[in-house]
């Protein structure tokens, strides 16, 4: 249980920057299943909204760069006045007339660097698409883990509440026996302490449930005042079919397909971008060609009535002090680093695959062990209650048996949540959530 609380606290701080708001749910109590919680988070998570906005920004940048390849046209209007003054040319006064000139300019630039820059921008947008899918996967996993934690807390609370009712009844019966002189006062005091411990445990679980539900509300992008009611039970996710699927996941021969992993895809995109960046820097040696056409017409005044100008400019790089060569070498080193990172990522992912499958197998073994342990603890407590009611057992023995039973319940619940979380971690690695 301590481990589950630590997971919940860590997720709370990691998600503390998320501001929740949902126009469809404000206050009140909302009953929700795990699948509904995940779907809602996908639609309203602020993290995903920012990631989607980043993707849209890159798509707009592509449109901006594509527009730069089209001819650029501009118009102008120029007015000039001399305020009626005259100028003297060889003793002949000439009155300076006002003038109005309109003009238009059309230009087109062809540069290989610009074309390659556009291609790199498209690759960057593709990288942002993969990043969005990766963020989507992370949001799903966080919601699933938080929902599981709530189910475990609620199950433990339900067990303790049921046990508390039974202990209160035993305490009442023991009080009657003490009044009649059949048991010692220590028996009633021991049972009273046991009841108080159970009541404190329920209060602690209530606080844990409240904090974890608030975290889930934030992750789902709902209004902070929303009260949640989780409709699922932790046992819903540990059926025979799901256990069989988990065993199949850890079977020998099951391997990770790297092409399905989003972290691997991100590095693939980075390598493509780094390779194209080398070409971009090399294209800096290719001449840039600019063609322009200018038209102007003096509609009033002026010395010339119209003017047409055509211009072609070829900019040929000759010497830049070694700047371009340095940029090419830097791009090559960046590409080499990207390929090295890809190799490291491949090793790490394969190691994670082995580690996560081992964790899932360990969790399966722990679940089976705790299931058996819980069955034994239940039976022992049942027999101790019978002996206590028959006067063959002290309240201290009964209390100890009850504590062992509750510990078994807690260990079983923790084994359950560790099992489903281990499966979720492996599914995220496989991009199968």
Image: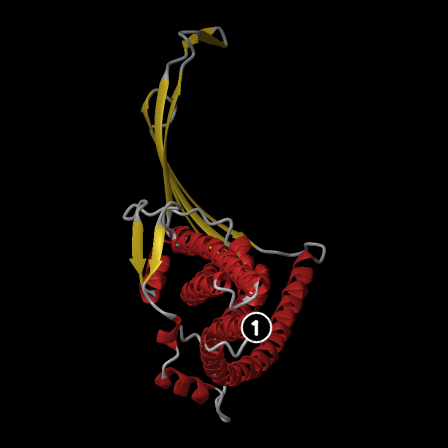
Determine the image quadrant of residue 239. bottom left
Query: Which residue sits furthest left?
Result: 24
Q: Which residue is mark 1?
A: 400
Task: Answer yes or no: is residue 431 visible.
Answer: yes
Coloration of the structure image: secondary structure
Q: Position of residue 391 (x, y in %)?
A: 50, 76
Q: Position of residue 253 (x, y in %)?
A: 49, 93
Q: Position of residue 167 (x, y in %)?
A: 46, 65
- Residue depicted at 34% across the width and 57% down the height: 229
- Using a 10 Å C-alpha cutoff, classify the residue at mark 1 as few (fewer than 14 neighbours), some (14 to 19) or many (20 or more): some
- In the rendered structure, the answer to whether residue 355 lies left or right of residue 47 reads right
- Residue depicted at 58% across the width and 59% down the height: 284
Q: Quadrant of the N terminus?
A: bottom right
Secondary structure, mark 1, is helix
Query: Which residue sits furthest right?
Result: 321
Q: Position of residue 135 (x, y in %)?
A: 45, 62
Q: Quadrant of the C terminus?
A: bottom left
Q: Nearer the viewer, residue 412 or 251?
A: 412
Query: Which residue sits furthest front?
Result: 180
Q: Nearer the viewer, residue 327 or 130?
A: 130
Q: Nearer the viewer, residue 88 or 59?
A: 59
| Vertical position of residue 353 compared to residue 213: above or below | below
- In the rendered structure, the answer to whether residue 126 lies left or right of residue 26 reads right
- Residue depicted at 63% across the width and 65% down the height: 331
Task: Answer yes or no: is residue 134 visible.
Answer: no
| Vertical position of residue 240 compared to residue 222: above or below | below
């Amino acid at each position: 249980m301590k481990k589950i609380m630590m997971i919940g606290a860590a997720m709370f701080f990691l998600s503390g920057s998320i501001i929740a708001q949902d126009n469809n749910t404000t206050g009140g109590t909302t009953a929700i299943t795990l699948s509904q919680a995940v779907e809602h988070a996908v639609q309203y998570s602020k993290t995903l909204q920012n990631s989607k906005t980043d993707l849209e920004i890159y798509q707009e940048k592509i449109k901006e760069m594509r527009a730069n390849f089209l001819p650029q046209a501009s118009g102008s209007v120029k007015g000039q006045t001399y305020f009626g003054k005259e100028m003297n040319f060889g003793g002949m006064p000439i009155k300076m007339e006002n003038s109005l000139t309109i003009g238009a300019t059309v230009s087109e630039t062809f540069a290989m660097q610009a074309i390659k820059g556009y291609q790199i921008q498209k690759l960057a947008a593709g990288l942002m698409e993969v990043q969005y899918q990766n963020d989507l996967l992370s949001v799903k996993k966080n919601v699933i883990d938080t929902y599981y934690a709530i189910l475990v807390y609620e199950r433990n609370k339900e067990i303790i509440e049921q046990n508390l009712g039974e202990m209160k009844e035993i305490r009442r019966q023991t009080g009657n026996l003490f009044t009649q002189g059949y048991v010692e006062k220590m028996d009633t005091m021991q049972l009273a302490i046991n009841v108080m411990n159970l009541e404190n445990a329920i209060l602690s679980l209530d606080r844990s449930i409240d904090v974890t539900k608030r975290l889930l509300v934030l992750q789902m992008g709902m209004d902070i005042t929303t009260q949640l009611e989780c409709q699922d039970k932790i046992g819903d996710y540990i059926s025979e079919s799901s256990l069989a699927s988990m065993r199949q996941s850890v079977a020998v021969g099951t391997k990770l397909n790297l092409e399905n992993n989003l972290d691997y895809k991100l590095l693939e995109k980075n390598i493509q971008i780094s390779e194209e960046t080398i070409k971009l820097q090399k294209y800096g040696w290719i001449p840039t060609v600019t063609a322009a056409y200018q038209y102007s017409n003096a509609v009033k005044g002026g010395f010339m009535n119209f003017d047409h100008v055509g211009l072609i400019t070829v900019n040929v790089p000759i010497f830049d002090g070694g700047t371009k060569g340095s940029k090419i070498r830097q791009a090559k080193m960046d590409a080499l680093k990207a390929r090295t990172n890809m190799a490291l990522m491949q090793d790490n992912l394969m190691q994670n695959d082995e580690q996560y499958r081992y964790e899932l197998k360990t969790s399966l073994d722990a679940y089976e062990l705790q299931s058996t342990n819980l069955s034994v603890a239940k039976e022992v407590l049942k027999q101790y209650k019978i002996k206590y009611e028959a006067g063959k057992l002290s309240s201290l023995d009964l209390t100890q048996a009850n504590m062992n039973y509750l510990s078994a319940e807690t260990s079983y619940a923790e084994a359950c949540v560790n099992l489903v979380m281990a499966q979720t971690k492996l599914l995220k690695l496989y991009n199968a959530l």
